[in-house]
Amino acid sequence: MNTLRNRTLFITGASRGIGKAIALRAAADGANIVIAAKTAEPDPRLPGTIFTAAEEIEAAGGRALPLIVDVRNENQVSEAIAKAVAKFGGIDILVNNASAISITKMPDTPIKRYDLMMDINVRGTFVCSQACLPHLMKSSNPHILTLSPPIAMKPKWFAAHAAYTTSKFGMSMLVYGMAEEFREFGIAVNALWPRTIIATAALNVARQGSGESGRTPQIMADAAHFILTRDSKKTTGNFFLDEGVLRQSGVNDFSSYLVTPGTEPTIDLYVEP
């Protein structure tokens, strides 16, 4: 299988950034996309809503179902999944993309922000994966793809932003657990993380414009497509980096993904140079 045609993807946080890029790449194959995100009204700092994303997905060749979903709310998640199954007949792929970020040291991290990161990043991943499981078990090639990093227990990743690191590693720990637990069902559970920073509106807010030295979300979308079209029974328990995935698929020139042509992209958090 090298296409996602007629597959149904439930993508959290798909109204913008990496989530939307993954959705658009799948839409180009003719996939069904459930846009599970909170943004129904435009935000001047973070452009894009579930409805504008749906328009783009359908223009790209896919079918879209935009749903207002707070991944922290298990009732909203369950209702969204029920609507997705009613419209598309099932769920083949879950992409745990929704995430909160705060690159701050402990004294500068409000408890409200700490709670937000733990609730969206860790709890949201658990809630969505648990709720999708019965439907994934019915799919012929089921995948869960979580956007979280390889776990590297080094002090430098905790010293400057312990709360954020703990939340992202929490997502990765769930990948470890689910990959083994769901192996008997033939459900692939993998993590994907960028080798370099990805230029998204959310990153620009968090890091104040550092996306100019990064790559576009398209590199993550292309890597995700390669993973999600592989045999789920033979592709599980991996912590992929986007660049490594694409090299496996035969891509060696990444210049087309650069935000600023001719620059050397900045290595992302949790990745060794």
Image (cartoon, rainbow, N blue to C red):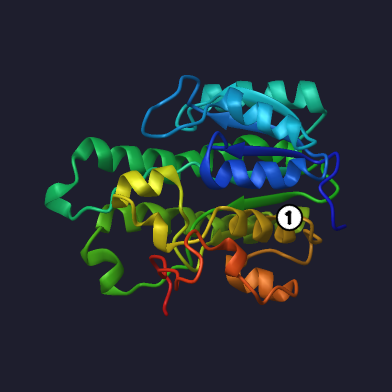
Q: Is residue 220 above or below residue 263?
A: above
On screen, residue 129 versus residue 98, left or right, reads right
Q: Residues within 10 Å of mark 1 (few under 14, many from 20)?
A: many
What residue is drawn where x is 63% and y is 65%? Answer: 237
* Quarter of the figure with residue 235: bottom right
Classify residue 156 as left or right of residue 48. left
Amino acid type for the residue under numbered disc 1: Leu
Q: Quadrant of residue 44?
A: top left
Q: Residue, x 75% and y 57% (percent of image)?
A: 184
- The one of 179 and 256 positioned closer to us in this rendering: 256
Residue 92 shows in this picture:
no
Q: Who is closer to the viewer here, 90 or 35?
A: 35
Residue at x 75% of width, y 71% of height: 249
Q: For numbered disc 1, what is the local secondary structure?
A: helix
* Number of marks present in the image shown: 1
Q: Where is residue 142 in the image (x, y as percent from the top left)?
A: 76, 49
